[in-house]
Image (tube, rainbow, N blue to C red):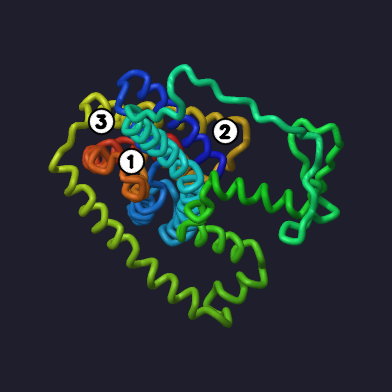
């Protein structure tokens, strides 16, 4: 499943790049377009669709109880992996896009100001002196044995010794500065990592999961809070979509392109990818698992994209309009694709 979601992100990004080349939108919208085409709502929507499909009579997925149990496990994994990809990829795409726009705005604002240092006709005089001597240590600025500071163009050979731990710290600082690890490890990503740790380590899993577990109250409390997440997210979606009714200056061709990518081209390519993986034995023959994999290519854009655009103030109103149209049309396209996918896996 992580590979399938990664394929959806890669294919969606390529289709989004093609859409950008065709429509030529404003620069501050490029990150938003790539994010909407790459990241799908693999969490809250699947939590609604899978239980509803399992409870239907004549479902191709077997017993409703077994289907619901396995289906919720598949959807939970899908939500966790998508959250990691979302905050490590889409966040940085939007951040880089908004940063480039801000840099251009700053350069335009300061482009007309010039400063003169010397009058015309004057030439700077060369500085006289000998530069072959090293800095001498003093009481105020002592020089340690490990570091020897030399002036440029000196004839002496200076060797700077840097410990391996300092190099590692510097490397981590550089990575943290470029990727903004505080945003990468968002609450949803941290929760996903914690869930993986609990599921992988048997001692922790047996103490938390199950009716006979010593700390079963923790699981019950988390489940109780999680049951309220879907209605809460639905209310948040309604609030965000309301802003899209006011409209913005976004191109209609851009909206049509994103709808075509999310609901036409991406599901077709995803169907070919999943069926090809099944044909070569890379995916087991569980119909419910294949159905979840196929749905990951047919969902509308992820809701967290709106949060990311609000963080950087780039394309907020445009994102609301895109979400309005994609989620309004999702009721039609998701119904059609779900019917086709159930027919394919049956």
Disc assigned to residue 255: 3
Disc assigned to residue 202: none
- Residue 346 location in percent, x, y? 44, 40
Q: Earlier in the sequence, mark 3 or mark 1?
A: 3
Residue receiving disc 1: 300
Question: Helix, strand or loop at disc 1?
Answer: loop
Task: Give the Cα separation between the discs numbered 3 and 1.
Answer: 12 Å
| Residue 301 appearing in the image | yes
Task: Give the Cα separation between the discs numbered 1 and 2.
Answer: 23 Å
In the figure, is residue 317 to the left or right of 339?
Answer: left
Disc assigned to residue 277: 2
Q: Nearer the viewer, mark 3 or mark 1?
A: 3
**217 relative to 305, above or below:** below
Residue at the spot 27% in from the left edge and 43% down from the top edge: 316
* Mark 3 touches mark 2? (CB < 8 Å): no
Residue at the spot 31% in from the left edge and 45% down from the top edge: 313
In the figure, is residue 152 to the left or right of 241?
Answer: right
């Amino acid at each position: 499943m992580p590979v399938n979601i990664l394929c959806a992100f890669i294919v969606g990004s390529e289709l989004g790049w093609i859409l950008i080349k065709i429509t030529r939108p404003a620069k501050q919208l490029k990150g938003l377009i790539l994010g909407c085409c790459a990241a799908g709502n693999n969490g809250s929507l699947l939590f609604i669709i899978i239980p509803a499909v399992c409870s239907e009579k004549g479902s191709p997925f077997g017993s409703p109880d077994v289907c619901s149990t396995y289906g919720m496990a598949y959807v939970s994994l899908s939500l966790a992996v998508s959250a990691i990809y979302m905050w490590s990829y889409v966040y940085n795409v939007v951040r880089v896009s908004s940063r480039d726009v801000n840099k251009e705005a700053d350069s335009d604002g300061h482009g007309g100001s010039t400063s003169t240092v010397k009058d015309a006709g004057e030439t700077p005089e060369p500085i006289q002196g000998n530069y072959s001597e090293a800095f001498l240590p003093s009481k105020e600025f002592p020089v340690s044995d490990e570091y020897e500071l030399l002036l440029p163009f000196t004839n002496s050979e200076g060797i700077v010794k840097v410990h391996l731990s300092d190099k590692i710290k510097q490397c981590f600082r550089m990575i943290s500065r470029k990727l903004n690890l505080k945003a990468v490890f968002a609450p949803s990503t941290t929760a996903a990592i914690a869930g993986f740790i609990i599921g992988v380590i048997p001692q922790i899993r047996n103490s938390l999961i199950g009716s006979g577990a010593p700390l079963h109250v923790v699981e019950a409390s988390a489940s109780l809070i999680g049951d309220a997440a879907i209605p809460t997210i639905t209310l948040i979606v309604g609030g965000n979509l309301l802003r899209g009714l006011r409209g913005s200056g976004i191109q209609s061709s851009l909206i049509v392109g994103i709808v075509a990518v999310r609901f036409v081209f991406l599901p077709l390519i995803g169907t070919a990818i999943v069926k090809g993986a099944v044909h070569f034995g890379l995916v087991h023959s569980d119909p419910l698992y294949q159905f979840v994999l196929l749905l990951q290519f047919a969902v509308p854009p992820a809701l967290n994209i709106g949060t990311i655009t609000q963080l950087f103030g780039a394309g907020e109103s445009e994102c609301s309009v895109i979400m309005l149209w994609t989620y309004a049309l999702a009721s039609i396209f998701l119904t059609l694709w779900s019917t086709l996918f159930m027919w394919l896996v049956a």
